[in-house]
């Protein structure tokens, strides 16, 4: 391959999807999709977490604010959570968050929670393609531009340095 | 040596913040002994031209309450920013956008339409709307223009400190004044209130079970509230766990759940997101339909979790066709 | 040397070609140049195989030469090689947790056909990793001692072999089997392919070794109730079902069985696949281990109705019968677990056109195994239901396997089992035997030779999937017979083969409760329902739950040699863990910043492991690091940002969010 590819100029709208995948089921399914060479739309970018229970609604909001047109949360099927119930906690938050997002004019196809088992590589492919297609139809998420706060965007504001690993 | 000069101004607000100054009671005498109010439209007769006449930085400190929604408010915020060495966002509206900020759930056009046309009490056959400038026989008169969205003060001008609350608790005001007078101020950008959530030392904390899960969210106006027991433990949606303390548990002591007026602690990016995460996690069901049923009594999540801070939240305002692609102002 | 977080980041980015796996789709040189242009990146390189020794060596050298304190490797999934690169970093004196991987193979090159789009996605993932890694801080794995005992679940040949290997290595083994005897399916077989060894002859000595081995505690008629803990320290609750016969007293004389008030067997004999009846008190089978009688509570009059002459009690010379027995539980601690829970056979009724259950002379393979067996219901006589000897026998392959309506997979053993059965039937009865196959799979040592042998013996082979088994005779020769309708795809004609007996080579399928077992042990299933191995090639007996290993058909269809080999491998892996003596725990635990915690207790009920308690004196939550498994649920729920998770801090995740969304 030549060393200087010209990156394609987007002709049609290419949605950006941030995906939060749990380590045990959905991330593994993503690896499986890869191993099986199941091609899918390149719009989804995966962030690995240990459990869908780690997904804070703030992450979803931050992703939307940062320019995501959609957010996908992938966790183990009900009953299959590696940590027993993390996926249920994710489901509870997701439901409330969705109610809020509807009020904010964010369409339901934009933020999804899917149960994808480690063996369901094909489901990763299917959802990624499906979501990309739906978001193309919906068009970009048109959030109001946030004013900068004291010269820097609030969303990118770093909270005080996290407490570094409290010694066990 | 002359006393430090201080200003106190209001923008899109209700007047409650001024009331909080009155709540200083006798202590107001100590304040007036220590500082000179040079601009305080609610209490004293100063004009904008008086401020314009001041040298830049003439005021040691200026507190602005109220959100920013109009051209006039923006202009005043910028003017006062120039004239004050320390600019303080005073109260929830100035700090986070406040209750006026909930207007960001709608666009400007639909707000004007509702107010000037659709409300049952409106009689406006000519559909007359406020104009930025109107020619009258005596010349041209101007009205402030309503902005597309409500903003917090720091979304318009740089802010040095925040005094949170709706209205700010008297103690926070006293502490802030003492800090300004002694010069013992924390790093700029700080919220002048404790950085821990309200549950800490809450008088009802001992009655909160360690393993609290919630079966049903009750609405305070529909149920009798036990005056001793943790409100969350009773099923009332109390936002104490997510909200900055410093109010002296005023609502809790009045037997009402916390509605979050002091806003988030410093570690939170999106107050409503954090509060929703905590409270939804406690829903006592793993069944999709049952969870939905339990959340049904939270009829207005935006109004519940962003009551005082929609403009300061990550989404800022309702997404819509008239908006540009998300991001920040350049 | 562990560097401090306050140091400015000096990041090295290493982009792997993975041969052509990545480089064919991702312009690695472009990505490298992009990475080099990012803030704080001081060196960026590509290499053919980053995981190879020279690749690792390059990283090690760079860390020292360029004084790197952060490394990003853009290659395959972190689930595959994170450990490899952590080791490389540690070898150069860098904290291994200052590494972040960008998965540009499984998530990019293998799934993105377009090179330019793949390259762009790779850039985004690397951008996120570079941003995130700056927030990494030093961590260390904690060492926890490993309990030296090992639990083997399932007493078929795989479980037996694993238990014996471990016990012979001097380890304490618990073997738990839910049936009254160990032996599993192998005990039901007559001969084993391709060598035609007698199954019992090779299995029963091993069963008795299990019984007598000083290092093995055998619990039959027992099931695993609960599994808690983690690799090295599992806490397991075993439920012992009452057999109403004291195992320690019973010598298996069978007097009780003869004395039972039922003179004849009344209940379906599971071991003989229902081809015979047993009494409510019975010996599971002649070579049962332990050789102890069992009372079936579903049919025993004393247990069902409370009234019986209880001749069994009278007859027992050792007073072993005890109707007072109740379910009991034992709690054990083990360091490792081997699952060898086996399989069940496909229910042939689901393919009604083959007539199983409708035509008496349609049998499953396992039923015929019992018929062939000298200890079986007919004493080894292959007879039809009416006692007659079959003159012609048709064996249908792939019943339930390689069938989109049921199981798409190949059950692996049926071809060889069918060949063996063809041989045995021909040998015992002289019958003409037809095999109906789709493809003949005889791929292991000695298998093809056996196929040749059976061909030479005159067994007929017809290539084609059988359409139907019917008793509708249209020719005189078909009268009173079962007619197998099949397209002979080698000749290209539809044939009707009249036979006396049909044998269905039914598929192997996951145990009925495989999903429940999977949840209990916190492992995964693959799409076919068998337990999922950690890696199909490089971790074939490991699972995604450390310390839990797989052996035998519970992982996927396989024959006896493969099951035994896998059991040996699982035993070796378990030994490895136990002999090492400690496990290292990923430091991804959650923690509470006491200065920020308001003591609101939101986190406490959310922890599935009860790791969070409240310090009443300080009024804050406390997370027990030994109990925390690092899911992060409490961290996401904490409304005041007081809870954090090592390796997955809010700041790191926000950096990733911003990183993947950046225009690259």
Image (tube, rainbow, N blue to C red):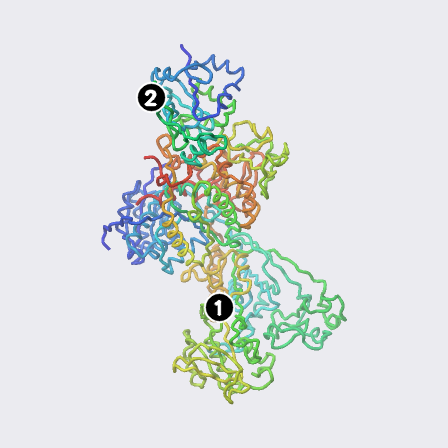
Mark 2–mark 1 Cα distance, whole angstroms, equals 84 Å
Instruction: Name which residue lies at 50% across and 52% down.
Output: A82
Compare residues C409 and B321 and report the one nearer the observer. B321
Query: Badge 2, how many Cα within 10 Å: few under 14, some, many 20+?
Result: few
Instruction: Look at the numbered disc 1 and give the secondary structure of its residue.
Output: loop
Q: Quadrant of residue C441?
A: bottom left
- Say which quadrant the C terminus of chain B sits in: top left
Q: Position of residue B251 (x, y in %)?
A: 57, 29
Q: Secondary structure at mark 2?
A: strand
* Position above or below: B308 against C103: above
**Mark 2 vs mark 1: in front:** 2
Residue A65, numbered label: none
Where residue B61 appears, as percent x and y from the top left, is 41, 19
Residues marked 2 and 1 touching at CB (< 8 Å) = no
Furthest-front residue in this view: B125
Image x and y of residue B258, in percent: 55, 32
Depth check, front residue: C31 or C535: C31
User: Chain ID for label 2?
Assistant: B
Residue A52: x %, y % from top left: 47, 48
Can the viewer see residue B112 in this picture?
A: yes
Q: Name the residue that disc number 2 marks.
A: B140
Give me the disc on residue C406: 1
């Amino acid at each position: 391959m030549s060393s200087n590819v010209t990156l394609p100029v987007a002709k049609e709208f290419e949605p950006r999807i941030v995906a939060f995948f749990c380590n045990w089921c959905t991330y593994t399914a993503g690896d499986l999709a890869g191993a099986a060479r199941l091609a899918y739309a390149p719009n989804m970018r995966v962030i690995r977490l240990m459990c869908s229970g780690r997904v804070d609604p703030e992450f979803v909001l931050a992703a939307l604010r940062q320019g995501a047109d959609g957010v996908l949360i992938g966790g183990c099927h009900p009953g299959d959570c590696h940590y027993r119930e993390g996926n249920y906690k994710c489901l509870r938050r997701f439901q409330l968050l969705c109610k809020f997002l509807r009020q904010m004019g964010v369409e339901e196809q934009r933020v999804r929670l899917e149960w994808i088992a480690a063996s369901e590589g094909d489901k990763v492919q299917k959802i990624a393609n499906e979501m990309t297609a739906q978001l193309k139809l919906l068009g970009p998420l048109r959030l109001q531009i946030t004013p900068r706060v004291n010269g820097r965007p609030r969303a990118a504001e770093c909270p005080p340095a996290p407490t570094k690993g409290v010694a066990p | 040596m002359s006393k430090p000069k201080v200003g106190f101004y209001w923008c899109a607000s209700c007047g409650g913040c001024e009331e909080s100054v009155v709540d200083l009671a006798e202590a107001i005498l100590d304040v007036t002994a220590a500082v000179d109010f040079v601009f305080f439209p609610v209490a004293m007769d100063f004009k904008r031209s008086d401020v314009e006449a001041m040298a830049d930085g003439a005021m040691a400190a200026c507190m602005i309450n109220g959100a920013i929604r109009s051209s006039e408010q923006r202009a005043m915020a910028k003017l006062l920013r120039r004239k004050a060495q320390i600019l303080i966002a005073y109260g929830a509206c100035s700090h986070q956008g406040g209750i006026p900020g909930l207007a960001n759930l709608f666009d400007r056009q639909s707000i004007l339409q509702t107010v000037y046309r659709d409300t049952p009490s409106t009689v406006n056959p000519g559909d007359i709307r406020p104009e930025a400038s109107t020619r009258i026989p005596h010349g041209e008169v101007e009205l402030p223009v309503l902005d597309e969205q409500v903003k917090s003060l720091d979304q318009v001008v740089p802010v040095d400190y925040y005094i949170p609350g709706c209205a700010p608790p008297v103690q926070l005001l006293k502490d802030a004044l003492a800090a300004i007078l002694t010069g013992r101020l924390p790093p700029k950008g700080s919220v002048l209130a404790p950085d821990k959530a309200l549950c800490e030392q809450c008088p009802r904390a001992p009655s909160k079970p360690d393993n609290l899960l919630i079966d049903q969210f009750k609405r305070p106006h529909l149920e009798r509230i036990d005056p001793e027991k943790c409100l969350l433990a009773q099923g009332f949606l109390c936002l104490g766990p997510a909200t900055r303390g410093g109010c002296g548990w005023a609502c809790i002591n009045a037997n009402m759940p916390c509605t979050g007026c002091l806003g988030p602690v410093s570690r939170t990016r999106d107050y409503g997101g954090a509060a929703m995460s905590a409270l939804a996690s406690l829903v006592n069901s793993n069944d999709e339909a049952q969870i939905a049923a339990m959340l049904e009594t939270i009829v207005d999540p935006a109004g519940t979790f962003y009551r005082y801070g929609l403009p300061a939240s990550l989404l800022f305002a309702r997404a819509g066709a008239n908006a540009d692609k998300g991001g920040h102002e350049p | 040397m562990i560097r401090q977080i306050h140091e400015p980041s000096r990041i090295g980015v290493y982009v792997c070609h993975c041969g052509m796996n990545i480089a064919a789709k991702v312009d690695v040189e472009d990505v490298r140049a992009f990475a080099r242009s990012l803030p704080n990146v001081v060196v960026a390189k590509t290499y053919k195989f980053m995981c190879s020794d020279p690749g690792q060596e390059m990283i090690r050298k760079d860390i020292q030469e360029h004084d790197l304190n952060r490394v990003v490797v853009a290659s395959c999934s972190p689930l595959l090689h994170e450990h490899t690169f952590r080791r490389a970093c540690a070898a150069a004196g860098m904290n291994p947790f200052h590494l972040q991987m960008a998965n540009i193979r499984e998530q990019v090159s293998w799934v993105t056909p377009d090179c330019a789009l793949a390259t762009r996605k790779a850039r985004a993932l690397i951008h996120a990793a570079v941003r995130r890694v700056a927030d990494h801080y030093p961590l260390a794995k904690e060492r926890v001692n490993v309990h030296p005992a090992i639990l083997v679940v399932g007493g078929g040949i795989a479980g037996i072999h694993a238990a014996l290997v471990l016990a012979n290595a001097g380890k304490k083994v618990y073997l738990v089997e839910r049936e009254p005897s160990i032996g599993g399916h192998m005990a039901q077989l007559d001969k084993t392919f391709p060598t035609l060894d007698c199954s019992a002859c090779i299995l029963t000595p091993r069963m008795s070794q299990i019984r007598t081995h000083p290092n093995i505690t055998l619990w039959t008629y027992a099931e695993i109730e609960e599994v808690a803990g983690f690799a090295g320290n599992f806490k397991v609750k075993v439920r012992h079902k009452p057999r109403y016969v004291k195992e320690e007293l019973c010598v298996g004389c069978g007097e009780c069985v003869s004395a039972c008030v039922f003179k004849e067997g009344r209940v379906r004999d599971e071991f003989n696949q229902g081809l015979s009846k047993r009494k409510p008190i019975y010996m599971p089978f002649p070579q049962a281990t332990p050789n102890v009688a069992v009372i079936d509570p579903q049919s025993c009059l004393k247990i069902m109705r409370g009234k019986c002459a209880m001749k069994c009690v009278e007859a027992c010379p050792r007073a072993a019968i005890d109707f007072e027995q109740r379910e009991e539980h034992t709690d054990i601690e083990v360091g490792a677990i081997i699952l060898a829970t086996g399989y069940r056979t496909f229910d042939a009724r689901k393919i009604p056109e083959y007539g199983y259950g409708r035509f008496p002379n349609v049998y499953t393979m396992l039923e015929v195994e019992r018929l062939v067996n000298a200890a079986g219901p007919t004493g080894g006589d292959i007879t039809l239901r009416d006692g007659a000897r079959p003159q012609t026998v048709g064996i249908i392959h792939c019943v339930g396997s390689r069938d989109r309506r049921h199981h798409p997979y190949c059950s692996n053993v049926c071809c060889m089992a069918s060949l063996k059965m063809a041989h045995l039937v021909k040998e015992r009865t002289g019958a003409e035997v037809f095999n109906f196959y789709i493809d003949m799979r005889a791929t292991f040592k000695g298998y093809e030779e056996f196929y040749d042998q059976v061909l030479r013996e005159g067994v007929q082979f017809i290539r084609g999937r059988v359409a139907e088994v019917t008793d509708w005779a249209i020719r005189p020769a078909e009268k009173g017979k079962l007619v197998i309708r099949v397209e002979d795809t080698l000749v290209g004609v539809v044939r009707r083969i009249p036979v006396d007996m049909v044998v269905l080579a039914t598929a192997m399928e996951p145990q009925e409760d495989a999903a429940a077992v999977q949840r209990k042990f916190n492992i995964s299933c693959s799409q076919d329902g068998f337990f999922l191995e950690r890696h199909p090639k490089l971790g074939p007996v490991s699972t995604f739950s450390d310390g839990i290993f797989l052996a035998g058909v519970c992982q996927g269809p396989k024959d006896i040699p493969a099951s035994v080999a896998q059991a040996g491998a699982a035993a070796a892996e378990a030994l490895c863990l136990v002999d090492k003596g400690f496990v290292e725990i990923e430091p991804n635990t959650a923690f509470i910043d006491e200065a920020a915690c308001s003591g609101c207790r939101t986190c406490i009920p959310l922890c599935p492991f009860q790791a969070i308690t409240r310090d009443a004196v300080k009024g804050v939550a406390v997370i027990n690091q030994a109990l925390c498994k690092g899911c992060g649920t409490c961290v996401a729920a904490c409304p005041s940002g007081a809870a954090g998770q090592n390796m997955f801090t809010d700041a790191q995740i926000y950096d990733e969010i911003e990183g993947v969304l950046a225009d690259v």
